[in-house]
Image: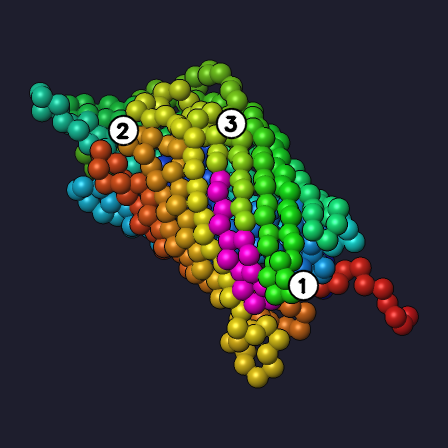
Amino acid sequence: MIKKLFLALTFLATIAISAQEGTSSPYSFYGLGDIKFKGTHDARSMGGLGIAYDSIHLNLLNPATYSRLKITNFVVGGTTTLSNLSNEEKRETAQRTSIDYLAVGLPLGKFGATFGVMPFSSVGYKIQNESTNSAGVTTNKDYTGEGGVNRVFAGAAYSFSDNLSFGVDFQYNFGTIQTESFIISSNSILGTKEINESRVSGVSSNMSLLYSRNINNDLLFTTTFGYAPEAKLNSENSRNISTIYNYSNGTQVVNDERDVVIDDNKLVIPSKFSVGAGIGNTKKWFVGVEYINTKNSDLVNRFNEVRNSFYEDSQKIIVGGYFIPKYNSFSSYWSRVNYRAGFRYENTGLIVNSKEINDYGINFGLGLPVGGRFSNINVGFEYGKKGTVYNNLIEENYFSLNIGLSLNDLWFEKRKYD
């Protein structure tokens, strides 16, 4: 049944992910948009920790863990996010619901494989700006953006021994980003509208090495190293400019509309390096720390007209873990629940109006057992803060509810009876 369910959901999820608006962040104006979390919700509930693994859960953050799977694992997850956006003068709220991933992991002896689909980035913003010059003329500027970049991916891993494994992921990235600006002054009924569209496509990859060793009968030490080389995506660009009559009753009529030829360009997915270490008892508890460095200084915006912003390398620190009171308890359901928590801090590398845009959050969640083959529902909560109200910028305070399903089955189990 899980095979049929996966095929149906893959088809539906690919369509839904391509059409969804997964962010309301004004900072999705820059680069490829708001970069989405790439893991499952059990990892997200630990702050995004990519080093934790076991034999029944798929870890999409760390391809070296694919070969540690002992049972086929199907995962799907979604998020609802409520955001409060504020500056020094006013506050707005926004809500978004999105599908975050759909994937399956296959154990193949010393090998492991996975494939699936997820969003890579999302663009979704509405910004209004009003300014008055010394002559008393007020200029209103409205900016909107939508779309994003999605990816289908496949990966494989090999265990050289019980202690050492290596894995690699390959991704095909695709999507369309459309942005619109409308500018009009109080001394004119004529406004200018500009629509830009970028059709993005290209391949990328990432790899990791995982080493684990028993310190004694109770403790397992794990360390991991990850690397993603720089990838360049093709961006086919188009632009449409029009003059708009803006009447006092709110009616807008297009007067002069024309397409403008602009150059196609290359957009960068920057290289990334990660290192992490942790210790624990796999069936009881685990705690780990991870450092991620992304060369965001190589990022470019979709169009060169963006002002007052640039990029530097990004740094991220994650601390997280889990605790299971008694995984094989028969008398208490809540003793078999996986309790997770984590914290992350990230300097995103984006600098706007000479101000660093930082993002930090706290997470906690529950892995709720269901069924008889180690399947579970993962419920997570996240509170975070991004940006600042100073330097004419916007601060985001967001709360997310994450729900994921992790189903396990034996796809290649030999029949004992015919």
Q: Is residue 267 left or right of residue 109?
A: left
Q: Is residue 52 magenta?
A: no
Question: Circle 2 sits in a helix, a strand or a loop, which is it?
Answer: loop
Residue count near mark 2 (Cα–Cα under 10 Å), binned few <14, some 14–19, many ≥20:
some
Decide if residue 334 is in sight here.
yes
Q: Where, quadrant-wise, is the N terminus in this rendering?
A: bottom right
- State the image coordinates of residue 391 (x, y, percent, origin top left): 22, 33
Near-viewer residue (273 or 248):
273
Near-viewer residue (272 or 175):
272
Where is mark 3, residue-wise? 268
- State the image coordinates of residue 370 (x, y, percent, origin top left): 60, 71
Q: Which residues are magenta?
A: 278-292
Q: Amino acid at mark 1?
A: Asn
Q: In the rendered view, tell whether residue 111 sits above or below residue 262.
A: below
Q: Is residue 51 left or right of residue 345?
A: right
* Residue found at x 68% / y 69%: 373
Distance from disc 2 to disc 3, alpha carbons, whole Å, reads 22 Å
Q: In the rendered view, tell whether residue 290 sits above or below residue 323.
A: above
Near-viewer residue (136 or 282):
282
Q: Amino acid at mark 3?
A: Val
Which residue lies most toward the left here?
Answer: 135
Contact between labelled residues 3 and 2, with CB atoms less than 8 Å apart: no
Give residue 353's mark. Answer: 2
Q: Which tag, 2 or 3, sits closer to the chain's start?
A: 3
